[in-house]
Amino acid sequence: MLIRLITPAPAGSFHGNRVTASRWARLLRDLGHRVRIAQDYRGEPCDLLVALHARRSYEAVSFYKKQRPGAPLIVALTGTDLYGDLRKSRNARMALEWADALVLLQPLGAAALPAHLRGKARAIIQSAVKPVRAIHAPRGEFRVCVLAHLRPVKDPLLAAAACRNLPDASRIRVLHLGRALTRGMEKKARKEMAREPRYRWLGEVPRPRALSILAGSRLLLLTSRLEGGANAVSEALAAGVPVLSSRIPGSIGILGDGYPGFFPAGDARALARLLDRCESDTAFYRRLRDLRFQSSIRRRP
């Protein structure tokens, strides 16, 4: 098939939507399809349109349906779609109505959809491969890795705030990898490094190196206030690294409701207590490390 994959993020962008589009294109090409990634659709030939992000890809979806009303359309929903835009954006809701199929990144996303659309939704947990090498922390350091760009929805500086609530003797060091998307966020990250020596922000790091740093860490920390289903969680699981995450549907849908590594979103003190327990309670840490996907994620939404 010739597949047009629409993403709102431009070529060369470090935004998650572009990274996801590039990864999906590679997987589809491995299956024998031809794939073209674009930000918009203007009538180019294709057998299938896949739109990533309902609201932001609305114009492309709308034009496609007008030009080719009987052609197949798949819309993949992001966290901002599910937990924000669907409640307030008519365009986002229309894109879902027009779609022949909806893709979710974890099964709990179905609960955020209008009931009459849930039958055409399918959850596809994002895949990941084990990194070829690990970059380990210095001896005696309990490294915690954060893989997230600095933007408000990621609550990126919660890790630094949690560090200030750790015991003085803690060996935890947070290594934060991700681009600051505004000058203001960059200034805040540098200020946090200056006041909290346990927190270090490295900025944008080439993806292979980022995954190697993750593989050599003791924990992945995800502090987001909302996610559709973070690929970083799959990457950590593939690398054998336990995950601590804010208790949000996007992570519960992957890790399972009973997973013990959740903390309330935005709560730096609760996160600090959980980090301290991971460092000081060997049995608890091993429990996190040894857990596997819950069977519920294999069910259709």
Image (cartoon, rainbow, N blue to C red):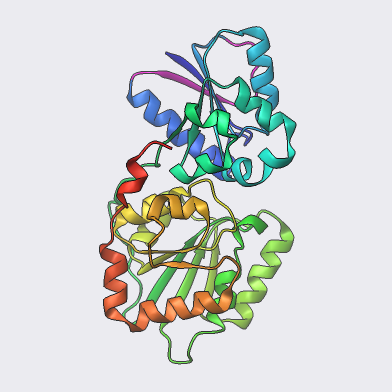
Hey, which quadrant is residue 126 in on the image? top left
Rendered view: 278 above or below 219:
below
Quadrant location, the N terminus = top left
37 part of magenta stretch: yes
Residue 162, by quadrant, is bottom right
The overriding secondary structure of the stretch rendered in magenta is loop
Does the magenta run of residues contain 169? no
Residue 203 at least partly seen? yes
| Residue 159 in the image: above or below residue 229 | below
Q: Residue at x 48, y 92 (%)?
A: 168
Let me know if residue 106 appears in the view.
Answer: no
Q: Magenta residues, as a range?
A: 32-44
Q: Is residue 21 left or right of residue 296?
A: right
Point 60% across, 42% down: residue: 82
Q: Nearer the viewer, residue 240 or 188?
A: 240
Residue 195, given in percent of the width and then of the height, sits at 63, 82
**Residue 80 drawn at (x, y percent):** 63, 45
Tell me if residue 65 comes above or below residue 147 in the rendering. Answer: above
